Amino acid sequence: MSARAVMVLGTTSGAGKSWLATALCRYYARQGLKVAPYKAQNMSNNARVVAGGEIGSAQYFQALAAKAEPDVRMNPLLLKPERDTHSQVVLLGQVDEVLTRMDWRGRSETVWPTVARALDELMVENDVVVIEGAGSPAEINLAASDIVNMRVARHTQAACLLVTDIDRGGAFAHLYGTWALIPEADRALIRGFVLNRFRGDAGLLAPGPQMLQDLTGVPTVATLPMWRQHGLPEEDGVFDDRHTSQGEITTRIAVVAYPRISNLDEFQPLKNVPGVHLKWARSPAELQGVDWVILHGSKHTSGDLAWLRAQGLDCAIAAHAGLGGAVLGICGGLQMLGEALIDTHGIDGNAPGLGLLPLVTTFEPAKTVQHTQASFATLQGPWAALSGLRVSGYEIHHGQTAQHPAMAAKGDVAREVLPGLGWQNAAGNVLGLYLHGLFEDAAVLQALFGRQGAARVPTLESVFEGLADYIEQHFEPGVLDALIAP
């Protein structure tokens, strides 16, 4: 192994591991080093198409930050939750049905040689590998089957940072408790504590950091101020309802947040468009007064449809569409807009659709995972500005969608506006697409929101540079370089 490994561990999920790892990727890459990200196992329904299949979105963005070509070795094991007790298992970019059926403890030992080999290859090919852990390394009930935290750290002798979210409270206890529960032999790998999302006067933290160092021997190497507008999507695509765009609100968009919603990270650009207010909707009341309703991807379309109906959201969406309100369905959302879901292979489940498009979706064992470029035909209604536009994005789906044969025989057909990928109703206000990444296309933003709206959305390059500048400013001098010193 020729590379130096830097690993970001967290005291909890959501502590800030993903964005810190992304910042480290860019920090080291702009020093002229060859950098790659790595996360042995990721559990997320946010995925991106890369060479060889699909990986978690966080590692995709980390690869771009590292100025590296994303590939499946950077996240060799991806778990995509379909129900509370079941996940689809993706190994090296491809769905593995045997692993999907396997008990998770047995699965860990089975896949360890594969995930370790992927890591070893990255260590040989790069100068620095930035590794992200998962959850907490102190989950002692999981330690015997660990393939993502301290086992990886030991395998590479990684210089580890342990980050905690101080805004939640209890940060010093989280750091000390995590350190204390890690095996003593592994504690030497922890080179520094990081306090993330701090608000207020950092001087008020004293003497806490020094007392913690006296107890553990580990210094606090950074106190990172709260920064909501860094521009990077959260690992699970979660956003809050704080209004962040500037100017008068002109477009109110509600994303219906069903339980197995997926690929939410692609909405990050909309948060920065002037005049756009983006929010969750989990009840009919939250659809009142909105301009757009978005039904997004789902890892379990039939289950999420059942949830919609239980909340009464099916009627609210139909009422919104009936009044001419804009409705956009993407991937699983497109499937929901049709008349029916047909599943003869036990992949997702059979269910009646919302009936807003005369389409039917059949689930097939083969999974479509690919980058796609296509041109819109002429569209009507609120989507007319997209007419003729050539767009790029990606597809990840088992379902195959077509016109409902019986309805088509009677002349009730949906207008195909994107070849094999998109359909619109006769009134023009309901649009369904299989294409992910629509709002990450600058041409789409300009068409829908104007040149000024598109210009206010930061590029990924500016986001990555901002992240690197941020940690360079707030880490103690010399710490980041010392992590990769021989």
Image (tube, grey):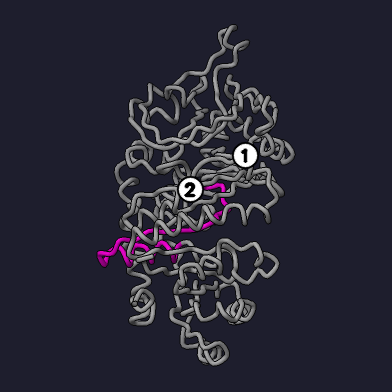
Q: Can you say which quadrant of the picture contains the C terminus?
A: bottom left
Q: Which residue is depicted at the point 38% across and 54% down?
A: 63
**Amino acid type, mark 2:** Ile
Q: Crowding near pointer 1: few (<14 within 10 Å), some, many (20+)?
A: few
Answer left or right for 128 relative to 251.
left
- Residue at the outermost left position: 32
Answer left or right for 323 relative to 443.
right
- Badge 2 marks a residue whose secondary structure is strand
Between 6 and 453, which is closer to the camera in this rendering?
6
Answer left or right for 287 relative to 253.
right
Residue 62 location in percent, x, y?
A: 40, 57
Q: Are marks 2 and 1 in contact (CB under 8 Å)?
A: no
309 to 47, vertically: above or below: above
* Numbered tag placed on residue 97 in the rendering: 1
Residue 238 location in percent, x, y?
A: 54, 54
* Numbered tag placed on residue 55 in the rendering: 2
Q: Crowding near pointer 2: few (<14 within 10 Å), some, many (20+)?
A: many
Can residue 241 be seen from the camera position used here?
no
**Amino acid type, mark 1:** Glu
Residue 7 location in percent, x, y?
A: 46, 68
State the extent of the magenta-drawn residues as a range.
19-46
Q: Which residue is depicted at the point 46% across and 88% down?
A: 203
Is residue 37 in the magenta section? yes
